[in-house]
Image (cartoon, grey):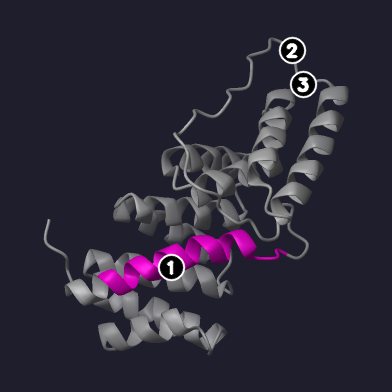
Amino acid sequence: MASPFPERGVARLSQIWQLLVLALMGIALCGCSFDLGSLMPEKEKPQEAPKAAAATESAVSAGNVSEAQAHTAKAQALAKSGETAAALDEFNHAVGLDPYNAQALYGRALIYQGKNQHDFAIADFSAASGLNPQKVEPLLGRAISYLALGKVKEAAADLDEASEADPHNAQVWTTRGQAYERLGDRTKAAASYTKAVSLRPRDDAARSGLARVGG
């Protein structure tokens, strides 16, 4: 399918999307249950499917929930120090103990995203979003993975929802601008970039996008 904008713009956007993934992993979400700090992607390895939580007839025990939280905290510390392989193991353990642990699901999604394992990332972002519908971070994360896979309409839908949930999140508006730019909707792209710049005047990605779409 032909690109709605020149190849040079496509190359620039590709660089921006890579930076977005790294930025998302490094955001300090003050007061948010999804704060993982900075995650550095390691060398790509063959994708392994996420460990599915074992189906249980009874509710997750309080002991399992507590243990899962401990593994999640350990995983977050490992992720912040760049030990993503060990962090992934801990997140897998946490999800196995408590499949409703949104923090672990979100953290694992960020690691998969950093490894360009976007299908797995999307699955975990979706699960985390379902458990915390009002949280913007899983929606933004899923949108970035959708963009990486070329599923631009799905990304735009997530970003529409995220921008309504948190209209003061500059990163959401910048990414929304990129999604609509790829869809060829210059009006929505310009409006999104303009909003991002109003919230974060030094947002180079938003300023560049605004210049491209003629806002």
Predominant SS along the magenta part: helix
Mark 1 or mark 2: whose residue is earlier in sequence: 2
Quarter of the picture containing the N terminus is: bottom left
Disc number placed over residue 148 in the picture, else none? none
Question: What residue span does the magenta drawing correspond to?
Answer: 11-29
In the rendered view, tell whether residue 195 sits above or below residue 158.
below
- Where does label 1 land, which residue? 175
Residue 57: which quarter of the image? top right
Identity of the amino acid at label 1?
A: Thr
Whether 141 is among the magenta residues is no
Question: Which residue is label 3 attached to?
Answer: 60
Q: Are marks 3 and 2 in contact (CB under 8 Å)?
A: no
Label 1 sits on a secondary structure element that is helix
**Above or below 42: residue 177:** below
Q: Nearer the viewer, residue 105 or 7?
A: 7
Q: CA distance from mark 1 to mark 3?
A: 37 Å
Residue at which label 2 appears: 58
Extreme left residue here? 2
User: At which x and y percent is residue 208?
Assistant: 37, 85
Q: Is 70 drawn above or below residue 16 in the view shown?
A: above
Please tell me whether mark 2 sits on a helix, a strand or a loop: loop
Which amino acid, by three-letter code, is at mark 2? Answer: Ser
113 relative position to 85: left or right: left
